Amino acid sequence: MKIILKYFLIMLGLLSNVSAENVSDIQHLRNEFNIAITNKENANKLYFQLSALKPAKNTLQYAYLGATEALLAKHAINPFSKLSYVNSAMRKLNMAVELNKNDIEIRYMRFSVESNMPAYLGYNEHIEVDKNILITGLSNIYIDKFNCKMYQVFATGLLNSNYCNLHEKSLLYVIISRCQKAQLN
């Protein structure tokens, strides 16, 4: 049985356009994750590829593995599978934040997952803390043409989350403006 499973996973890797080596490249991983948001098959491929990397050694990859599990929960039909994926996703995202508290990309992943969870699941305890760290981090970070799109996504996501007050929204509009200016340079 293990041999069949290994064969299946190897074939899945060979048949997909994305290899485990490619997802170790963080920009490629980001692009694949964005595709997986709306595509169940890509979410499954990305999950298997990230699992093959043993991303626990890399907190950003580990956070992407957790966020990908959250996508699998979104795409799952069975309620027990959904809950299993959600629990695993939150464990990974929380661990990634613990290991790298200042990484705003990891914080944004957890914020995004928690802010899209139904409140009755109880996975909303970090929303306020993550939001504050994200706004502070984005306000103080250097924005250039290489990172401006990602930071604009973070600021726009926060802005659209319904968790920000008027003052925070005005700060986010300034950050978005800085990102747009950086794109022109």
Image (cartoon, rainbow, N blue to C red):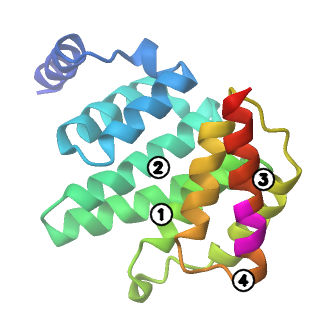
Question: Dot 4 lies on which element?
Answer: helix
**Comes first in the chain, label 3 or label 1:** 1
Residue at position x 22%, y 43% from top?
Answer: 39
Disc sitting over residue 113 in the figure = 1
In reply to whether residue 183 is colored magenta, the answer given is no
- Disc 4 + disc 2, Cβ < 8 Å: no
**Comes first in the chain, label 4 or label 2:** 2
The N terminus: image quadrant: top left
Near mark 2 (Cα within 10 A), the count class, few <14, some 14-19 or many ≥20, is many
Classify 159 as above or below 44.
Answer: below
Disc sitting over residue 138 in the figure = 3
Residue at position x 45%, y 42% from top?
Answer: 65
Magenta segment = 169-173
The mark closer to the camera, 1 or 2, is: 1
Q: Which residue is mark 2?
A: 66
Question: Dot 2 lies on which element?
Answer: helix
**Comes first in the chain, label 4 or label 3:** 3
Near mark 1 (Cα within 10 A), the count class, few <14, some 14-19 or many ≥20, is many
Task: Inspect the image, locate mark 1, and give the three-letter code of the amino acid beneath it.
Answer: Val
The C terminus: image quadrant: top right
In reply to whether residue 170 is colored magenta, the answer given is yes
**Marks 4 and 3, how far apart in space?**
17 Å
Which of 149 and 44 lies nearest the eye of the viewer? 149
**Marks 2 and 3, how far apart in space?**
23 Å
* Residue 87 picture quarter: bottom left
Which residue lies most toward the bottom here? 120
Whether residue 94 is visible to the viewer of this picture, yes or no, is no
Question: Dot 3 lies on which element?
Answer: helix
- Where's residue 90, x and y in %? 50, 62
- Disc 2 + disc 3, Cβ < 8 Å: no
Which of 90 and 177 lies nearest the eye of the viewer? 177
Task: Inspect the image, locate mark 2, and give the three-letter code of the amino acid beneath it.
Answer: Gly
